[in-house]
Amino acid sequence: MLLSSIFYAKLLLLNIIEKKFMADKDFLVIKLEKHPTKDILDDHVNGELTVIWRDWDKIISHEPKMVYVSSVFPGQVKGPHIHTKRNSYFSCIYGSVTFIVKDKNGKYHEIETNSDEPTLIHIPKNIASAHLNSGNEIAHVLTLADVSWKPNDNEMKNITFDDYDWKRLKT
């Protein structure tokens, strides 16, 4: 029991350290924990578990009120747009996705994500972003949001990234 408490304390500390190294003032990239799962009969590894969110981790500063999965077809882009009321947390759970974030100074940041090396991307409200599937299979993105979506709530503003070189990323 003591060893597992020490292990989880170290993981929490590593998450805090990673947040500091991977944080920009306008968004945040958090490397997620992956744990092997084991068969109950002979203890062989039968899969894995990726921790997206736990209330005691405190890696999410805006508690989720809605969780959903969206898909992005190969070669397609979702966005760019701005959420004016909600903070969003994204994790690619299948395939690979590049998140393009435009910070408040107009600088673009490209964040490569995939399901093999899970990360959680925090895009605060009023920060422009898009995500692009440059792979050959449908990608799935899990989203946690602190404000639930409602039809006709008009909190999302579609924009364009006219000065961004989309051709460079698309296959």
Image (cartoon, rainbow, N blue to C red):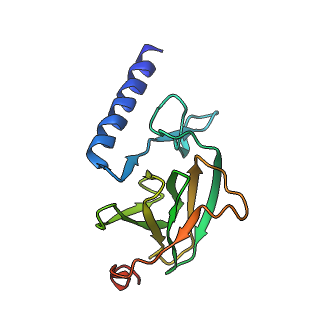
Q: Residue at x 47, y 31 (%)?
A: 57
The reply, left or right, for residue 72 in relation to residue 57 is right
> Residue 158 at what x, y percent from top left?
53, 73
Residue 20, quarter of the rendered image: top left
Furthest-left residue in view?
21
The reply, left or right, for residue 126 in relation to residue 155 is left
Q: Return the residue nearer the eye: 28 or 161.
A: 161
Report how many numbered discs are placed on residues in the image: 0
Q: Residue at x 55, y 31 (%)?
A: 55
Q: Return the residue nearer the eye: 109 or 87.
A: 87
> Residue 53 at what x, y percent from top left?
53, 40
Seen in the picture, residue 136 relative to 152 is either above or below; the reply is: below
Q: Return the residue nearer the eye: 110 or 160.
A: 160
Q: Residue at x 42, y 26 (%)?
A: 8
Residue 14, quarter of the rendered image: top left
Seen in the picture, residue 161 relative to 63 is either above or below; the reply is: below
Furthest-right residue in view?
151
Q: Return the residue nearer the eye: 83 or 144.
A: 83
> Residue 43 at what x, y percent from top left?
56, 34
Q: Residue at x 31, y 48 (%)?
A: 23
Seen in the picture, residue 43 relative to 79 is either above or below; the reply is: above
Q: Work out which quarter of the rendered image holds the C terminus and state it.
A: bottom left
> Residue 49 at what x, y percent from top left?
54, 43
